[in-house]
Image (cartoon, rainbow, N blue to C red):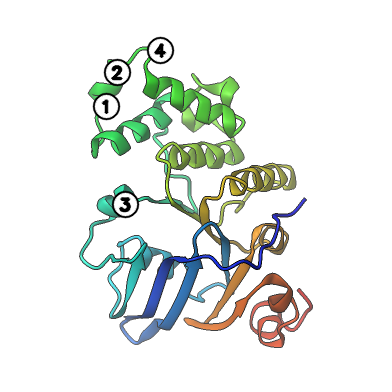
Amino acid sequence: MTVARTASARRPLLEMRGISKRFGGLAALSDINLTVEEGSVHAIIGPNGAGKSTLLNVLVGLIEPDQGEVVFDGRPLAGITPHDIIQLGIARVFQTPQIFPGMTLLQNVAIAALAKRDGKFAVKVLESLTRTHPIIEESAAMLERVGLGAKLDEIAEQLSRGDKRRLELAICLVCRPRLLLLDEPTAGMSRHDTNTTVELLEEIAKGGMTKVIIEHDMHVVFTLAERITVLAQGRVIADGPPEEIRGNPKVQEAYLGGAQV
């Protein structure tokens, strides 16, 4: 099963304009221009060291670019803190799951829902909520949605890697983001867990949420993405629909050693 492609025009939700970033003598990003349309699934691929994670860190405010600007829904993000960027509706699933290992799954998701509602983390507030509180019910429903409904009261650190990724996805989704950033969402997973995660992401895609995916697994990329941007040595070398990227000789040479995608 693959996500349905669409040729209809959609307005830009995210724009990265002329983004450049150097670390000493290394040009990590050089004049990057990227447009992500609202409601689309946009993949960013490239070899190790291409600048993919640096680009996401610039997007969420963890790294300040030397040049260029990031615009979300028409609003420049310069000077906005990472926390405020989350409040604007951008959520990120990291390469290494960012969870509270000593808390239950339900507590992990509920504290994120509270932070979205109140603008801050408040463990004491969480401890006062009953199982019938709307926040708790919403969090339980989100865990059910990602396939973890039977594990509400398990401690997060006891989960498998695949389940930790699904928990982090539930944490992001309960915040109801407009843009979901997925940094290597299937990294380190078994093929079974990868397939389960892809099916889940396909189901989420049907809801129209805009997603940017960084991923090395080409099966995942070509299953999910409507558009693909390819980075190499901090520069965009190709950008277009999957069928164009698949046959692009620059992509084959830079990313796949000349082999057909």
Label 2 with label 4: CB-CB less than 8 Å? no
Cα separation, mark 2 vs mark 3, equals 27 Å
Q: Viewed as shown, does residue 62 lie left or right of 217? A: left
On the image, numbered disc 4 is attached to which residue? 132
Which sits in the foreground, 117 or 171? 117
Q: Are marks 2 and 1 in contact (CB under 8 Å)?
A: yes
Based on the displayed image, in which of its 4 quarters is residue 75 positioned? bottom left
Q: Secondary structure at mark 3?
A: helix
Question: Do callouts 1 and 3 mark residues in contact (Cβ within 8 Å)?
Answer: no
Residue 226: horizontal and vertical position, in percent? 64, 64
Give the mark nearest the N terminus, 1 or 4: 1
Q: Is residue 208 visible?
A: yes
Query: Mark 2 sits on what residue?
Result: 127
**Earlier sequence position, callout 3 versus callout 4:** 3
Residue placed under numbered mark 3 in the picture: 88
**What x and y, as percent, mark residue 22?**
33, 81
Q: CA distance from mark 3 to mark 4?
A: 28 Å
Distance from Cα at disc 2 to Cα at disc 1: 6 Å
Q: Secondary structure at mark 1?
A: helix
User: What residue is disc 1 on?
Assistant: 123
Tell me if mark 4 has few (under 14), some (14-19) or many (20+) residues whose alpha carbon lies within 10 angstroms of its own.
few
Farthest front residue? 8
Please, what is the three-letter code of the amino acid marked with disc 2?
Glu
Q: State how far apart marks 1 and 3 are (Cα).
A: 22 Å
Per the model, the C-alpha gap separating discs 2 and 4 is: 13 Å
* Eye-nearest disc, 2 or 4: 4
Task: Name the residue located 57 percent from the left edge and 68 percent from the top edge.
Answer: 9
- Mark 2 or mark 3, earlier in chain: 3
